[in-house]
Image (spheres, rainbow, N blue to C red):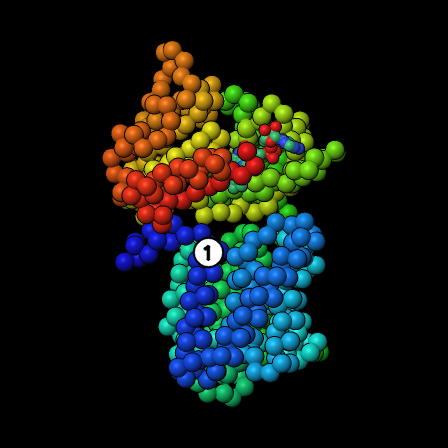
Amino acid sequence: MLKKIDQWLNGVIMYRLVLWGLSAIAVFAIAWGFLGLIAYDGSSLLLSALIAVAVCQFSNLALARICKAQINAESSMITGLILFLIMGPVMSYQDAGLLAVTALVAMLSKYLLAYSHKHIFNPVAVAAVIMATVSGYAAWWWIATWNLLPIVLVVSFLIVRKTRREALFVATVVAGLGTSLLYALTHGYDLVEALEIYTLAGPMLFFAAVMVTEPLCLPGRRNAQLVYGVLVGVLANWKFNIGLLYSSPELALVIANLWSFVIGYKHKLYLILEEKRLVAANTYEFVFAMNQKLRWLAGQYLEITLPHSQVDQRGVRRSFTIASSDQEGKVKLGVKFPNEPSSFKKKLLALAIGERVTAGKPEGDFILPRDKTVPILCLAGGIGVTPFRAMISELIARGERRDLILLYANRSSADVAYRELFREAVEKLGIKVYYLLTHPCEGEECDGQMIDRETIARLVPQLADSIAYISGPSAMVTSLKKMLKEMGMSGFRIKTDYFSGF
Ligand SMILES: Cc1cc2nc3c(=O)[nH]c(=O)nc-3n(C[C@H](O)[C@H](O)[C@H](O)COP(=O)(O)OP(=O)(O)OC[C@H]3O[C@@H](n4cnc5c(N)ncnc54)[C@H](O)[C@@H]3O)c2cc1C
């Protein structure tokens, strides 16, 4: 059962899962409202949902245009849905206005309370705290109700499992429970009642699974994440006030966000260039040491910031997959250089040994499946091979045998990178690597010309049971995904990494 769930989760991106989960809770809540199964009227819940989501969507569109930022429509819908689920249902014009202003404040916070283009505070939490302090319009947490508990439990489980934040979730919930019981004990409340409120009728499950796990405000390192969870759990469940600020889950999260920002700032990740070498035609490998210990999952990427003079319109940031596994102890990037590179890439190539660049924390879901028995098909186009290099290096380091086939497409053999590592994996782990060259020269080792139906049918015997990973230029990824679906593969079993920018 768990295996099936994991397979399904492997095929869904994180933001979409959260969006679907919250939408499911919202639909149940509104339906329960119309059926009289919860204390709130269905029509006022429906109106609240529409206001929260619409204001978040439209204000985000407008703000992104003003700030020339990229839009993630899913994330503003998620913000709107969480606001709907925690702020009071709309029962008057005044409620409607206050909810709309809260949604606007949440979106503004993403742009105004931000550093280095990343928001510092969870937008929902900070908007709820500001509104409660300024106008007395506070979160109700009406989502914490018995009749919605089953759907909240299912969605919370799926989100925590997908984001792999089990430890953070447990730290938050256990610290919260301990604090809640201690508070009851020291203030003469009934312990059983406190336990019941905490576990069944309180907002902690939803809060810990959906809001505390929000990735952008989390500290990067695992231990710091656990401290973050404990801090939130304790502050959310011990009653206190600081002037006009009264303890609440949202205030606890805002305080923890601030702490995460401060330590994140102090522990800013720098990559220090140690080595630069040509690994294929026009493709360089950059090997970096780090200024701090860093953990990542093979297949994740990070964002590099490289300030330089005469910046072209493409700017100073780029995402690159970490081509190494973290057992290698170094961040390796494989970067393709065109004849006329951007100003960013010119600067990258000109970096001297010992020079440093700033990096964000490793992110992404394009990682090996948890289930070690499932066959894996990796389809790489050109430099899109970098996540597979990281995964295969990790398997070699762990001595872990998996049923893995890599189809690696290039123009000619001069464009093939990392051949030695792949040969080692073939010998040690029995994985299969096929080189497909569209312009093979005479005598070249070549397993075919391109990744097409015929090649896949010939080289991949277990396609239907496999999980497929596709990585490369966006157009290639889109067309291969379509092709695999036409060959009968479920979309849930296809994972994609779009190297946008080429
Ligand atoms: C999750 C993720 C992971 C990625 N991993 C990798 C990776 O491991 N390795 C990797 O190489 N890339 C990776 N990419 C892509 C990378 O982030 C860049 O977008 C890509 O390398 C293009 O770089 P560039 O914009 O500097 O353009 P370039 O590669 O320098 O140029 C691309 C094309 O645009 C043209 N061009 C360049 N500058 C301009 C300009 N100012 N105006 C008009 N045209 C111009 C060039 O002539 C060329 O034809 C990844 C992207 C994502 C989203």
Res 128 quadrant in image = bottom right
Residue at left offset 45%, top offset 75%: 30
Residue at left offset 34%, top offset 43%: 485
Q: Is residue 164 above or below residue 183?
A: above
- As drawn, the residue found furthest toward the top would be 442
Asked whether 321 or 343 is in front, the reply is: 343
Mark 1 residue element: helix
Quarter holding ligand 1: top right
Give the percent coordinates (x, y) of residue 201: 44, 79
Asked whether 373 or 54 is in front, the reply is: 54
Q: Quadrant of the C terminus?
A: top right
Q: Is residue 180 above or below residue 402?
A: below
Q: Can residue 36 be seen?
A: yes
Q: Can residue 391 be seen?
A: no
Asked whether 143 or 363 is in front, the reply is: 143
Give the percent coordinates (x, y) of residue 246: 64, 78
Asked whether 164 or 40 is in front, the reply is: 40
Q: Is residue 48 above or below residue 467?
A: below
Residue at left offset 46%, top offset 65%: 22
Residue at left offset 24%, top offset 35%: 461
Q: Residues within 10 Å of mark 1 (few under 14, many from 20)?
A: few
Give the percent coordinates (x, y) of residue 198: 46, 77
* Mark 1 within 8 Å of ligand 1, using the beta carbon: no
- As drawn, the residue found furthest toward the left would be 461
Give the percent coordinates (x, y) of residue 101: 65, 71
Res 24 quadrant in image = bottom left
Query: Which residue was labeled with disc 1?
Result: 16
